Image (spheres, rainbow, N blue to C red):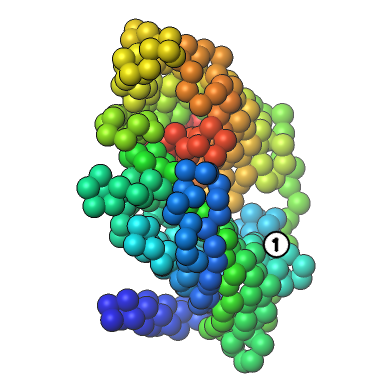
Amino acid sequence: MRLKFFIITMLWGCFCFAQETKKQKPYTIDASPFYGAVLLHNPNISHLITTNPSGFMLGFNRKTYGEKTWESLYNYPDYGASFVYQNMHSETLGEHYAFYAHYNFYFFKRTLQLRAAQGLAYATKPYDKNSNFRNNAYGSRILSATYLTLNYQREHVYKQLGVKVGFSIIHFSNGNFKAPNTSTNTLAFNVGLVYSFSDEMEIPYKKAENSIEKLDVLRYNVVLRGGVNESDVIGSGQYGFVVVTTFVEKQINRKGKIQFGVDFFFSNFLKELIRYQSIAFPELDVTADSDYKRIGLFVGHELALGKNSITTQLGYYAYYPFDFEGRLYNRIGIKRYLSDIVFCAVTLKSHAAAAEAVEFGVGFKF
């Protein structure tokens, strides 16, 4: 009953808000139930894949028409907020309630829509050593939530009502904030409706003006990142970490930049992992005084979306005294520019598909 009340309230709020702003910009809402299967991305969760999850997605979208240069560069995407409810139909995995910020990108005359969303989720049944010890997927109630959808979408099929149908990948993980963190990925089929609050033809699309980019300019950046994480050893404890990053970037076109830099990692959870392995696994030849610090070299790319951007980086540990998940690492995240000099960022650092930490950072550009 509470869930139904929440859905009705959210839809009514979106409706009222869109009606008030109809004269300024058109908005849409969409609703899509889904049904799918949990992917076996890790053999350690094979005992959890016994049912087919289902749920629904709600989206609130604001259209763009080229008022800012970046909008026309990406074929006038939407941006907005969405909510996902997923029932794993499992006494062990429980249910998820997730809120996201998202972008919708369009292809093939705006009939194919790709949505990329990132947010936070609440898990009803995380791991508990006494009552839910079988759940090695989520070690905490608050999870990092990501989903991608690829839909065939047609708006105004009947007046202001449209349809959408496609597939989604829904990911829940806590970024090793607390062990265990094997995570789940759901591949789902979804079908739904789209409601537009105004006629799309009322506002014409504007093309970006040609501009000469300063491709020869190098900019230097310093970023301070931090957070809390835990090793994969359940009960080993959560510890703070600090990452100092410096890199140089070069604009390559109006959409993106390339980066070359250095990371200095001070990961305190490795101190406890080193101590644990030196005692519990003598065959690994780990000494208790092994250095926990690491230094990495990386190359990266930044995709600009106005004041926001998406950062991807691939790194290699040049200084690597203690073996943890291999020498290669990767990072993906979202950056928000507060000014031409200051920015903040939230990134996920991992080794291939094995997450190490969610990093919160602030940076400066010179």
The residue at the far left in this view is 130
Q: In the rendered image, which residue does mark 1 sit on?
A: 75
Q: Nearest the camera: 64 or 204?
A: 64
Q: Residue at x 47, y 64 (%)?
A: 51
The answer to whether one can see residue 122 in this image is no
Q: Residue at x 51, y 75 (%)?
A: 33
Task: Give the x, y percent position of residue 287.
Answer: 37, 8
Q: Amino acid at mark 1?
A: Asn
Of the 4 image quadrants, the one containing the N terminus is bottom left
Q: Is residue 151 left or right of residue 36?
A: right
Task: Give the x, y percent position of residue 274.
Answer: 36, 17
Q: Residue at x 68, y 72 (%)?
A: 152
Q: Secondary structure at mark 1?
A: loop
Q: Residue at x 64, y 64 (%)?
A: 150
Mark 1 Cα-neighbour bin, 10 Å: few <14, some 14–19, many ≥20: some
In which quadrant of the rendered view does residue 16 lie? bottom left
Q: Examine the rendered structure and indicate whether residue 180 appears above or below residue 329.
A: below
Task: Give the x, y percent position of residue 37.
Answer: 54, 62
Total label count?
1
Q: Examine the rendered structure and indicate whether residue 358 appears above or below residue 45.
A: above
Q: Nearest the camera: 326 or 129?
A: 129
Q: Nearest the camera: 86 or 128?
A: 128
Q: Nearest the camera: 208 or 363?
A: 363
Task: Give the x, y percent position of residue 123.
Answer: 34, 57
The answer to whether one can see residue 333 in this image is yes
Q: Is residue 198 left or right of residue 344?
A: right
Q: Examine the rendered structure and indicate whether residue 190 appears above or below residue 72.
A: below
